[in-house]
Amino acid sequence: MAEPIRALCDELIKAVNVMMEAESSQTYRLEALKFIEEFKEKSPFCVECGLQLAEKSQTAVVRHFGLQILEHVVKFKWNDMAPQEKLQLKNCTMDLLSNGTHPILLEECHVKDALSRIVVEMIKREWPQHWPDMLKEMEALTAIGDAQTELVMLVLLRLAEDVITFQTLPTQRRRDIQHTLTQNMDSIFNFLLGILQLHVNEYKKLIKLPFSLQAKAHWRVGVATLNTLAGYIDWVALVHITNDNCHLLEIFCLLLSEPELQLEAAECLLIAISRKGKLEERKPFTVLFDEVAMNYILSAAQSSGGIVERRYTFLKRLCQVLCALGFQICSLLGSDIEVQVPVNLDKYMEALFAFTSHPSQFLKSSTQITWGNLFRHEILSKNPVVGQMAIKYLRAARINLLKTGFPSKNDCPGCEFSRVDFDSDEDFNCSFNSFRAQQGEAVRLACKIVPFEAFQIAREWVQYQILLLSVETKTEKGLCSALSLSAVQWDAMTFFTESVFGQLFKILEKEVRPSNEGIELLQMVVNYETRDPLILSCVLTIISTLFPFVTHQPHFLPQVLFKIFPSITFELVEECKGPRTRAVKNVRRHACSSILRICRDYSDFMLPCFDMMYEHAKGLFSNELLLTQMEKCALMEALILVSNQFKDYNKQKAFLKELIAPVTAQWLSEEMRSVLWDPATFLAYVGADQVISDLDTEDQMGINRSQISFCVNTILGVVKRARWPANPEEAKAGSFVVSTTSDGAPIYRNPCAEPLQALLPNLFALIRTQNSLFLPENINRLSKTFSRVYDIMDVEKNFALGIPQPVLDAYDSSAYRNIVERMQGFFSSLYDNCYQVLGNAGPCMQQDFYATEDLAEQIVGSAFIHLDSVPDHRLRPLVHILYIKIFCFNYYTQEEDEAYEENHVTQEVVEEQLLRLVTREVMDLLSKFPLLDSSQGIQMNTPSDELSELGKCLLQSEDIYMTLLAICFNSLSWEDTINCQRSASVLCWTLLKQVLGCNLLPEAVTWLYTSVLKGLQMHGQHEGCNAALTQLALLIYESLRPRYAELRFIMNQIPDIHVEALEQFDQKTIQSTVSKAGEKKKKEQFKRLIAGTVGKPLGQQFKKEVHIRNLPSLFKKPKPTKDMLENTDTACLITLFSSDCDSC
């Protein structure tokens, strides 16, 4: 027998070498793999060969393969082995643990791991029932040597991972093993702590000796023990961690000073402190605020070190430890648990601040949420230590907000760390933006604690930046680039100033604000002159931020406006004959936004300056070359916002008529009417049917497109901004109230309604024309140059795919787009804006809009026409804005498989993601707004039984209501878990319940129930979806099974269904005999019945099944209770003293 096995082993060794050698051809490698797999599946000599290949005399690769064979035997053949064979394999494995490995420093890690996996697989099948002494045998192995101790640690760690973390075994076996582990946890922890202390002490003694291999061996065991502890700390009872006044945590803190063990110790500490649980169980964690522990933590946090990977990883873990500790103290303080503010809170905050001021962007970012929690805490925020640290934090924020440290650069110490944490500048930029938002929130919270100190810090920074001489390197034009030092400093200072002053104006009463200093600062900013567009944008932001100080001294208002207005027409001398750069465009837009923001927030304060603003705007409007159409619209919106303070209906209406008179004349002209009403004329008017050979040539039809856009944008600005007075008395006095409702509420009229009503017919015509553009005959009218102008914009595509925008270092580059890009942008923005107008017209014009003649027919004939041709990305504005958007959904559910031939794969991904987004938005609208009664407090997984008024109205139309039902139940099997869970938990039952009393067709009932089961097949592996779908299926079955036997027929077709259990459940359902007390049991029974419908994840569908048999239960079944006094017979006394009652 030995000779055939030896020969077989030689063949296996050859096959393994062929697979592992880089020179092997693909054919030979596949043949070797096939031979090995057939051997593992069919050979009766797996154990013998595995043991022989695992001998120490073999190479590491061969030994690892031999151990894999043994693991395969245990996983897939254990149930078929005789008890004697199992015992023999177990003994051989234990022998391998004892003397089958090389010394600890020489043995390969993957060999140790493979050997430990075999032991764990046997434990999962036999312990504790058939292997009660397993723990004692493991403990005995540690007495042999360091290598065996490390292997025992690996076994215990993998056992915890398989049983608790990954749960890779049946429920009963998992319960048996977990129960036994829990019972023995005291001894296990004592054992692990003993091993740790022994080897750490030996390591400390020997590490002082030069070239001590034995010290490295003890270090290796210490690391393995700490890793094993980390696998248990995550789930054991907290009492095991906090025993003996948190002795375990103190050991971890002491190990923070050991460079070779500090990383593993920090990871254990992090897992322990991050534990959730009852507050009284977590109270002992405050021991880490004691003097000794906090000194070790502070020392480790403040110790310097270069960019060494292990050291840097340790700092990350220690930072997380401090953040977790902050979470614990914030949870405990102020709760019912008596906990005092830690004495060493200052040292804790110094340690946390050490990471906040670290060059690493990752470490700085990791602390921000914790600072926010500390500054927000009701008790801690009033502590003087926290107040002092808030000042220190604000000063540090001035450095942290500087966008420096890009991995591609070397201009600061953080760059080196960024190269470790980020793959590209784009990744860094995305992370920094998130960090800046978190820091802004922390700065605002710090301002609440020390408002006046924050004011002074922000004031000093603004003053310093204004007075600072610009000495940094500039571009060839003498201007800053986006990442030049001056621009970065101004950008950071602007953000800080916004965060500080925005909060101060909220928390400080007008009387206590430092208004004089604020006005002085604003005066300094207004007087500052610069021609650099990037810095000028920051100046405009600061002026808008400081504007509330102007309300203290109204005479200063004209000076502020005269500073902003020139920026609306800002130009660089060099640009007179060329296209504007992005930075210049941003300045002009920024100035318009500043005016808009001021007029929106301080419209009553701006009213005295209205005439001056209007005259200035008219002067700008008169010169076509000064402003773009968008800038004109922005100024018009600002004027409308101030005009809302006229509080005189006739005066405001006259102003609006005058303001939009040029737009009205152009919009209602015969030429424009012919363009808007005919798709062919429209395409010719905008130039989309022209062939352009040079894309950079002058755009002859651009003026036509800008006229259409200007008209639509002006209408949109009016419907968004024109309003009646908020005060009912002022509205009534100004003639804005036309009537009252039955309950006495006023009915208002908008002064813009009359001017806008005349413009609506052409707007509906434009919307209809735009939908018609996607018809084949109109697509054919597009020239070859513009054949792709209906495609999704790159910005929208990146948003749909979750691709972040690139770092913007192109402020000095031209914002010029070629004619195709401009045409594409025109169609996209025009489509969006038309629906924005339509969506805002109702809230703006009120009854005047709904009184429009044939309104319903006009909407259906424009917004809902040709939707089967409209692409998904064009439907999103319709979904977002119109309340009646629910009717359009059935048109685009069939478009999932369409893709363009060019860039097929990428385009298919984009279209699928867009379809997912559109459908998700529709389902979100159905669940949250139009159909369900929001007064019922609808929450996820809590279906409402009530419909809104709109829902009740739709219930009257069978076609519409059935369409809604079809949409909701269809969505259960779409490839989108969010849609599925929302529909199953909120929509489906609410809609179906309204028609349960109707005479539903059997085919409809069958389809509804099958749709739910299809959803389980698609999404059942996800816990949230499974719960929602199971509940929905049970509700349908209970409600409809008594009348529809077809449901029983469907249940019979479920794979692996238990027929007898189904029969019992079915009878109970028909007879409705289940009490409320048995509801939970009923749900569990039903869940087991339909378990066969739950599909497997793709990664599990082709995986070979591992079968682990249950062993005799560790839990005794309770004896049936008997009522010993149920009669007065003398037999009662006999029963009471029977043998069955001996244990009583």
Image: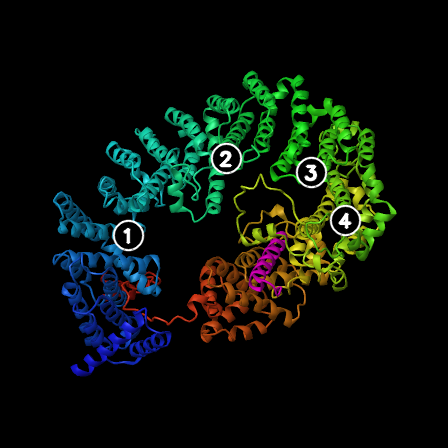
Q: Are marks 2 and 3 in contact (CB under 8 Å)?
A: no
Magenta-drawn segment = 899-926
Mark 4 sits on what residue? 701
- Based on the displayed image, in which of its 4 quarters is residue 994 positioned? bottom right
Q: Amino acid at mark 2?
A: Ser
For the N terminus, give its image quadrant: bottom left
For the residues marked 4 and 3, what is the alpha-carbon distance in whole angstroms? 20 Å
Provide the secondary structure element on which disc 1 rests. Answer: helix
Which numbered disc, 2 or 1, marks the residue that appears first in the sequence? 1
Q: Nearer the viewer, residue 599 or 418?
A: 418
Estimate the x, y position of residue 977 in percent, counting from the top left: 52, 59
State which mark lies toward you, 1 or 3. Answer: 3
Mark 1 sits on what residue? 232
Provide the secondary structure element on which disc 3 rests. Answer: loop
State which mark lies toward you, 2 or 1. Answer: 2
Mark 3 sits on what residue? 577
For the residues marked 2 and 1, what is the alpha-carbon distance in whole angstroms? 51 Å
